[in-house]
Amino acid sequence: MESQGAHKAGLAKIVPPKNWKPRRSYDDIDDLLIPAPIQQVVTGQSGLFTQYNIQKKAMTVKEFRKTANSDKFCSPRYDDFEELERKYWKNLTFNPPIYGADVNGTLYDPDVKEWNVGHLNTILDTVEHHSGITIEGVNTPYLYFGMWKTTFAWHTEDMDLYSINYLHFGEPKSWYCVPPEHGKRLERLAKGFFPGSSQNCEAFLRHKMTLISPSILKKYGIPFEKITQEAGEFMITFPYGYHAGFNHGFNCAESTNFATRRWIDYGKQAIMCSCRKDMVKISMDVFVRKFQPERYELWLAGKDNAPIDHSKPTPEAAEFLELKDEDDLLPLTGSTSLKMLPGYIYIHTPYTLHKNFYFGCD
């Protein structure tokens, strides 16, 4: 993907072959427990909102689905995405939905090897191999059970890592993204609109509480794009790619983080939340020592702080995908740290990067 510039957008959709399935059936998950669902209460107006999460009692997937499809919480009628998007921003502060977020586990069948979210085999595995530390949702997968209007607020990933999100089943999930090269502009805008939060914590967007509507982004000239993820599709977020979004109705997604060598410089410069003890922090020492040995002494001396080139692909990109001429298909040739899907995949991002290849937003 990065060999074709997908990382410049901050977000990419991957559509696997129709015959590829990570699980034979989802009929047997009704009794799966969602231990700590959250009710998302949103306050604010005029395109600027703050989201608060109230923990609710545990419920099963069957109970959650029944709640999500009830008259109180079900999706409204709509003709197209634009209409649903308008209804989302218009009704954001009403009737707080319940999100079955951060459920530890996977829905992949054990024999699935390709693009298994729980077994990506990237350099992030160094954390567990070196220190024996498991960070739930970061180097293990999390499940997310959504309903209409459940939201993920503007943020980058912990330590500005990559992430992968697979939508197992259900209604679509819509994403907004800001290209990494414009991330600082979004941060400045957010600090201006939420000065109290900014004064209390420099990295307050990591709290995942801040919602800024596309109309505000347009008004202040912040570049962004929209992509809608359908069931059976992957989304990849890239280091320092701010993203936010919402679910159209009852669905289930699975996600985790991963890393390439390009991420290391992002990890070294990631600005951390200073006010919460549960924020993820990964020591970069082992990554610099192992993958950037020529810079290790500079790193130890605190002098390895060169600015990041957001346009530069990861060194592994040469091993990734070769572009097929006169087609929008990428043949899966060469080796990669992510085990690839058989056949072909379609990739969509918000950039046009080749005369014969369009990365398009849905």
Image: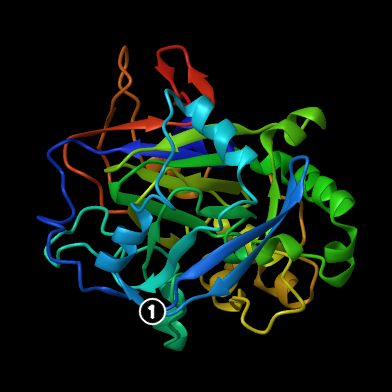
Q: Please say if 319 is above or below 147.
A: above
Q: Please say if 206 is above or below 226.
A: below
Query: Quadrant where the C terminus lies?
Result: top left
Locate residue 111, reporting x and y percent.
Answer: 11, 64
Quarter location, residue 90:
top right
Residue located at (76% from left, 79% from top): 275
Residue located at (48% from left, 34% from top): 227
Report the colour scheme.
rainbow
Quarter location, residue 10:
top right
Q: Residue furthest bottom?
A: 132
Locate residue 95, reporting x and y percent.
Answer: 56, 54
The one nearer the camera, 203 or 251, is: 251
Q: Going by the image, does 250 lie left or right of 25?
A: right
The one nearer the camera, 319 or 18, is: 18
Quarter location, residue 284:
bottom right
The one nearer the camera, 153 or 349, is: 153
Q: Residues within 10 Å of mark 1 (few under 14, many from 20)?
A: some
Residue located at (18% from left, 54% from top): 22
Locate residue 304, reporting x and y percent.
Answer: 75, 64
Q: Going by the image, does 80 lie left or right of 310?
A: left
Indicate the amino acid at tag 1: Ala
Residue placed under numbered mark 1 in the picture: 58
Q: Please say if 213 is above or below 120.
A: above
Query: Quadrant where the N terminus lies?
Result: top left
The one nearer the camera, 308 or 34, is: 34
Residue 288 in sight from this viewpoint: yes
Residue 312 in sight from this viewpoint: no
Locate residue 194, reporting x and y percent.
Answer: 84, 56
